[in-house]
Image (cartoon, grey):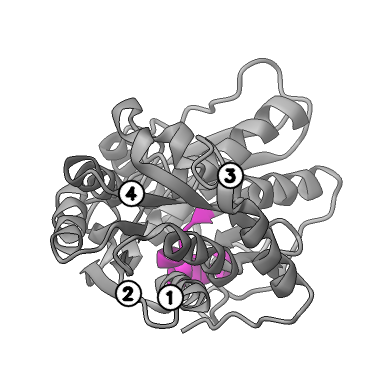
Amino acid sequence: MRSPMKLAAALSVSALALSACGGGGEDTTAGEATSDVKACMAYDVGGRGDQSFNDSAAKGLDKAKDELGVTTDEVEAKQGDNDAAREDRLNTLVDDGCTNIIAVGFIYGKAVGKAAKANPDVHFAIIDDASKDSAGDNVAQLTFAEQEGSYLVGAAAALKSKTHKVGFVGGMDVPLINKFEAGFEAGAKAVDPKIDVQVKYLADDGSGFADPVKGEAAAAGMYDKGADVVYHAAGGSGTGVFKAAKKANKMAIGVDSDQAKTAEAGLRSVILTSMVKNVDVAVFDYIKAATTGENKAGNIVYDLKQDGVGYSTTGGRVDDIKDKLEGYKKDIIDGKVTVPEK
């Protein structure tokens, strides 16, 4: 644990950090808590309201609050944060009495590792990171087989494409997002081996997940070059991809959440499907285990077989190809198809 002097300094920094990101340290539980668990979440850039990755995590936290009687708290990241700022944010939650802290996104890897080591009596979870940086006896690494879900939406894109050209927009060129790209391309080429897959990454840092303007420009360029379906794995930047699809009268594919339900109402009609990553399930399961005295640790993978990933059918735009998609899904689950990660 930290020394009294370090704790006092951290409290000072914590107050400033919470003020800056609008947290205030107030717990968000409605009604009387019935559990000793205080589950807290540190969001990635974009926070609640990104209609994608962060919102999916928030859904799991909200469900735990409503159904398990836990107390909750949350803080949001700021654009341009470094590892030290992220570690301070986690320590803010430690100082607020959180028993279980969930960091949303691989970008917290180093910060989680350091905070967990400094606070061995607090339990941590990190979404989308299984690196040595975040590993620890008190850390659960909640990861997903994104490549498997992406394979299915890649197949959907190829089955629906009339131009034999599709696109992928990633928020950041890192191994995690490379999994989305690799699965998407593999699925598309399983349907159409000669299909042209255009690829664009938006930034070298986390800003690529919160820049709809860049997302729109990237997708618009692909539509201009003949693509008629573009898949994004770019968080809040995906709104821009949908806007570009709307303007071009083309199709787009959402990510993480069923974005035909969460995107702006005027954009939902262009969303062919979404690669659904059930972050909410992982978050809820982690917190539920804590309420029973079982604090999970180690790498826990949610794949297609466990319904950790999948594709959405909202809007009925893939109903005519669903049998084919289910066939590809079965082949992956049965081990007949191994989806590449890069």
In the rendered structure, which segment of residues is drawn in magenta?
103-117
| Marker disc for residue 319 | 3
For disc 2, the neighbor class at 10 Å (few under 14, some 14 to 19, many from 20) is: many
Residue 109 on the magenta segment: yes
Residue type for callout 3: Asp
Considering every residue shown, the one lying at the far right of the view is: 292
| Marker disc for residue 251 | 4
Q: Are marks 4 and 1 in contact (CB under 8 Å)?
A: no
Residue type for callout 1: Glu
Residue at position x 35%, y 51% from top?
252
Residue 149 horizontal/vertical position (percent): 57, 63
Q: Are marks 2 and 4 in contact (CB under 8 Å)?
A: no
Q: Are marks 3 and 1 in contact (CB under 8 Å)?
A: no
Residue at position x 43%, y 79% from top?
175
Residue named by callout 2: 197
| Marker disc for residue 67 | none
Quote the CA–CA distance across marks 3 and 1.
Answer: 21 Å
Nearest to N terminus: mark 1 or mark 2: 1
Nearest to N terminus: mark 2 or mark 4: 2
- 295 in relation to 303, above or below: above
Residue type for callout 4: Met
Question: What SS does tag 2 mark?
Answer: strand
Residue 113 horizontal/vertical position (percent): 52, 71
Residue named by callout 1: 185
Q: Are marks 1 and 2 in contact (CB under 8 Å)?
A: yes
